[in-house]
Image: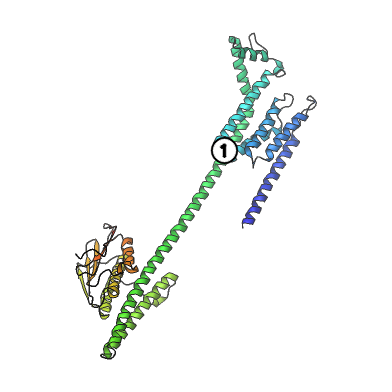
Amino acid sequence: MALIAEWRRLLGARRVLLLDVAVAVVLTLLSSPSTRVHADATAWWAFSAVMVAGLLIRHRRPLPAFLLALAGGAAHQLDLYVPLQPIDLIVPITLYAVAAHSSTRRISYVVLGLAITTAYVIGIVNLLRPGVAGGRFALPGTVSSKAELSMEALAGRPAPDSVAALAALLGEAVTSAMSVMFVLVLAFAWGTGVRSRTERLLLARRRAEDLEREQHQRTALATAAERARLAREMHDVVAHGLSVMVAQAQAAVAAQRRNPELSAQAMREVVTVGRSSLAEMRQLLGVLRGCSEGADRLPLPDTGDLPALIDRVRAAATPVAFRVEGEPVNLPTSVDLSVYRIIQEALTNTMKHAGPGASADVRLTFGRSQVEIEVSDDGVGFSGAEEGNGLRGIAERVKLLDGELELGRSAAGGVRVHARLPTSAGARFDRVVFHAPEVAPA
């Protein structure tokens, strides 16, 4: 692709150069200095060659090209025996190039001023030289020769008529250079318009590129957020399911000789939890792949599934006290799922880290604009549990919902997880508080 782009650039530059060569040839052929009255045409053609050189480099070096063209054009205008020729159009052509392609607008304005000043000065010089308008500047007064008029003005002794003659000279210089100035200003205005359109196109292209880049960034952030969400979901499913299955398997091994029926019941619970976890994992993987699997796509758990969750934890030999306070209300889907996952992860931490014989207490309180979750246990406390992914996942869920989370020791010495999630637009929290493990029990 880079090679193709380079070839296109070279071909485009060659086409531009061929076009400039064609313009130079046409203007040269149309120009014919009057050699009958002006015997020395060599100098005129030499300056024409300088102007052609400026024309050929105008795209790569617009400012030097204009200076070359201006030098040649000024020499042509100072030749009183040859009128303006088509080749003199190279001056406004190079001025257009400067106005359209110079590095800054200030340079183009300076160049325009230089071109107009040069044309005006050449007009004055030509009016002061013999051979123009009969060689005399016919104005009333004692000074009639142009050379004498200039000397009187420079000597500081202008008579009233001389002042009028000088003013008339300056005015006539403007009139004589008016057509040239008009062509120069027209070329400059055209080049400035092209420059403005080019800048607008570049600005629009940059904005489009910025918007496309921003869209890619938003997509990447959304993808990362979705992956993080799925990772949290997967962690909660796997961690809880495996914890329950391990506890049930241990109970089955312990009771297989003394109470075979209890052992069989524990293994049936292992099968049930394993199938449920596999179904949830299959659902999450389906979301990750972006495919639909029909009946395998089960609905996400919510607060209505909390009793079943509590029963599974109780069946794994972890006593759980569960109570609901307030009038239950329909929660937003994200809040409903987060309530379930927070309680699930807190109970999983109790099963994994609280130690044998620990019990948990779960309280779910529905308020007018928030739902409050509190899970505490009477285990050994923060024996490494605060460093795991579970509590970090809880904190991320609460933060995403603009909730409030407190992690610390419970009154019984174990771990206390207390979260408040807003359920309406008017409620908003933005605080996550981690109490250090060494804090004394409340």
Q: Position of residue 238 (x, y in %)?
A: 36, 75
Q: Position of residue 374 (x, y in %)?
A: 23, 67
Give the structural element (helix, strand or loop) at label 1: helix
Q: Is residue 238 visible?
A: yes
Quarter of the rendering containing residue 391: bottom left
Q: How is the image coloured?
A: rainbow
Please identify the residue farthest to the front as the structure is shown: 438
Q: Is residue 436 above or below residue 175?
A: below
Quarter of the rendering containing residue 119: top right
Q: Is residue 42 above or below residue 239?
A: above
Residue at position x 42%, y 61% in the image = 222
Residue at position x 35%, y 77% in the image = 277
Q: Is residue 376 left or right of residue 136?
A: left
Position of the N terminus, as image quadrant, is bottom right
Q: Position of residue 348 (x, y in %)?
A: 30, 73
Q: Is residue 407 above or below residue 49?
A: below
Residue denoted by label 1: 192
Position of the C terminus, as image quadrant, is bottom left
Residue at position x 30%, y 83% in the image = 250
Total numbered labels: 1
Comparing 349 with 80, the one in front is 349
Q: Position of residue 196 (x, y in %)?
A: 54, 41
Q: Judge the density around disc 1: few (<14), some (14-19), many (≥20) Cα neighbours within 10 Å.
A: many
Q: Is residue 93 visible?
A: no
Q: Is residue 391 left or right of residue 189?
A: left
Three-letter code, disc 1: Thr
